[in-house]
Every structure is written in structure tokens, then in C-alpha cells.
Amino acid sequence: VSPTDLPDHDCGADVAAYALGALEPDEANAFAVHLKTCAVCRDELAAFRGVVDVLPLSAPAHRAPRSLRRRVLREVRSPRRDPQGAGANRPRTWRLPASRLGPALAGAAAAVVLLIAVLGGFSGSAAPVRTIHAQVTGPGEANLRLSSGHNELVVSHLPPPPAGEIYEVWVRHGQSSPVPSGLFSVTSSGSGDVDVPGDLRGVTRVMVTPEPSGGSPHPTHAPIISASI
Amino acid sequence: MPPRRPTIRFRQAGPDLRDLADEDLMASVYEGDSHAFEVVFDRHADAAFSLAYRMCGRRGMAEDIVQEAFLSLWRSGAHYDRARGSVRSWILGVVRNRTIDVFRRDTVHAGRDVNAEDAVERMPSGDDVPADAERRSTAVEVRAALVQLPADQRQVVELAYFGGFSHSQIAEMLNLPAGTVKGRMRLALTKLRVSLEPLAGAATLSGGTA
């Protein structure tokens, strides 16, 4: 056991709160860094996560409504009509209102085919996924996955956004102002994904900033994720 | 329009699919097999809905949350990492996270006032309890383990997990030092770890049906 494997302070006090997702964002970030060098905390966290994973089973059981099943399966079985078509049945709170989306996205419904051509040789339904590794400021990883008719930003090990804030995705054409694309958060393990809909022709960068809940029409923070296309 | 996935296969959800473990089904989901997705949905939708309903206390909101969680799974099935736990844990983690996002967006959190004394049974069971004996048994075990905790320890776990509150918020609510709240969380999880060890191991390591 190396010295770095031993806790140099009362780090164990944070393990349970971290497992429960109850640390404040800055504390969670610091603890995630600490975990990299503390085997004791890693072991305890693994054990606590096993417990936290079964906590939801204590919720009184209800059968999911049949109408919910129909809606979900109808969405799954319907070929995507356009890049934003799949969002038609989404909860209202998960997407920026259309009025807040910039013109480049508002008019993007029919641009998928052009997108395929521009982004490098995708053709037909068997087109591969092109993955662009994004730069991340701080802990976590992010990849921009581009495929025919479906572009998404996938993150892992990303700390949660600060309290009262949410991550907002932006697309930028050259030096023009970033245009809001979508909102997302991450799971307790730091995983998350968000569609990047619309025509990405001319888009040179996809970015993520923490913004106030509900999103912002303009970035108010420096990007924590940036992917160059 | 091109299909969403490289290949979308339609086939009947026969016994062969329903015999597969979740982790194997996820591979088919990624390939665009809507029937594999249907099996995953049927296995876990009740638990997902129960969790969302337990957290937010509003049926419509719970439906929205679960719908979005499963559609997210459909769109990003490739990102399930079996090394990080079971499919069920993954799905329920997504549901919980999305519910907390809703809490953060709303100024009125009708469902967040988790009462420590009745939190475990706060939601009515109703007549629609799934007839799955194993699931009921598991739920009973977890509830029993929670009830056996000292009230002050159970309280902070309930507020954090189901209420989505941070330790600082809980400390403020309960007028306690933050260190006390975190200490109670640790004591609670340590005790639950012992009492739920077989169950926790099974939930983490196995896929199977919920």
C-alpha cells in the first residue's frame, strides 16, 4: 500500500453522501479527484453503491400505466421523422422551447440528408458512427457521436451541474454566437447523453456550459466541454 | 428518412428474447431491436414508475419522467456499461436523476417533502401492485432494513435519495451541522450494507428480471 492509498484526512465522511448523490457539486468534484488516489474510499464507495442501488426497490409498487407503455413503444417503433421528431412526446421540461432555439436549429427539420453528406461519407442506413473526442475542463469524458440522422453528445464521469443549474449544449458556426441546442444533466455516476439535433453543416464547435435551470439564451459560463468538428 | 439505428430489426418478442438477461438484451437494443427494448421496458417500467412516483408524488410527472428515461435508453443503449452495475440499477439511476432535474426546474416541489416518519410508505399501494412475488419480497426486505434503522439515520437517507436533497439542504432543514448529517448517512449505509448484503450483491451483479 503506497502512502497515496491511505486517506490523509477524514475522507470517509464524504463517501456515503457521495454514494447518495448528496454532496454539493464542488464537494463531489473534489471527492471524485480524491477517489483516484484513495483505495480505501473506492472500496467503501463500491460497497455503498450496492446498497444505494437497491434503495429504489423500497418504493411502494405501482404498475406503469398502459398508456405510458403505448407511448414509449410507439415512439420506438416509428422511424424518426426528423431530427426533432422524436422529441414530440418528450416531457415539456426536457427541451428548450422552440422559440428559444436559434434559426439554425429551428429550420433544421429536413437537413439530415445534407448533414450526412457533409460529415464525411455517411450513406444509407448502415452508416457508421463518427466519434469526436471532446475536450473537457475538469473531471469527466465527453464524445460527440455523429451518425445518420442522429447526433448526440455522450458524457461519462462528469460531475453534476452546480445546484440550481443544468448543462446546456451549444452549437457554434465559425465565430458567430453560440446557438442553444439542448439541456441535460447526468446520473449519479456521471453519465449522460443528449441529442444534438438539427443541421450541423457549418458547425465548427459543440460546447457545453453550466447554466441556470431552464437554460439560457446565451452562454453565461465558460465551456466545460468543447468538441471541434 | 434513414432509420435511427444502423439496422432496425423487427421480430416477435417470443420466449427466446424473454429468456435473455438484461445485459444481453441491451446488445440487441443497440442494434435497433425494438422487441428487445420492449422486453427491457416490460421488466423495469413498473419499478421505474414506482420510483418516479415515490419521488415526485405526481402521476403525470412520473409518467413523463419514465417515458423520457426509457427513450433515452433506446437512443443510447450502447452506453450501458455492465461493469458499473445491473441494467435495472442503470435505468433507475437515470429515472432518479431526471426526477431531480425536474425538482431543480420547478419552483414548487410538491413531491419533495419526504417525511421521515412515513417516507417508506408514503405512496399508496393501490390495487395495481404487480403480482410479482419476487419483487414484492425484495421490496419488503429493503423496507424492513430501512425501518430497522434509527429514525434519524433513516431520515437523512430518505431525504437524500428520494427527496434529492444535498447534505447541506438537509442540515439546514433539520438544523443540524453538515458533519452530523454526513455521519448519519454513513452510519445508515454501513448498517444497510450488512442487512442488505445478499440483496445488494444480487442487484448489482445480475441482470435477469426485476
Image (cartoon, coloured by chain):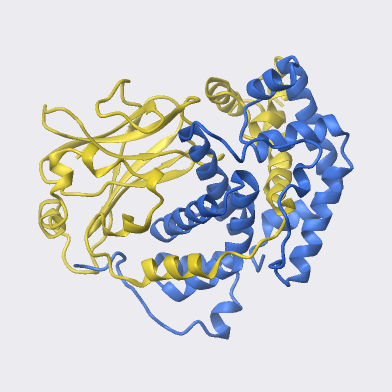
Chain colours: A yellow, B blue
A134 over B69 or under it: above or below:
above
Q: Is residue A82 left or right of residue B74?
A: left
Q: Position of residue B72 (x, y in %)?
A: 43, 54
Residue A8 versus residue A111: which sits nearer the camera? A111
Residue A177 visible within the image: yes
Quadrant containing the N terminus of chain A is: top right
Residue A43 visible to an observer of this rendering? no
Residue at image coords 27%, 65%: A80
At 77% across and 57% down in the image, what residue appears? B139
- Give the percent coordinates (x, y) of residue B117: 81, 38
Q: Answer above or below: position of B18 versus A186.
A: below
What is the x, y in percent for residue A29? 53, 24
Quarter where residue B56 is shown: top right
Taking the image as shown, residue A3 lies to the left or right of residue B68, namely right
Q: Where is residue A101 in the image (x, y as percent from the top left)?
A: 22, 39
For the C terminus of chain A, the quadrant is: top left
Q: Is residue A197 left or right of residue B200?
A: left
As rendered, which of B24 and A166 lies closer to the eye?
A166
Residue at the location (56% across, 54% down)?
A: B59
Q: How many labels does the image show?
A: 0
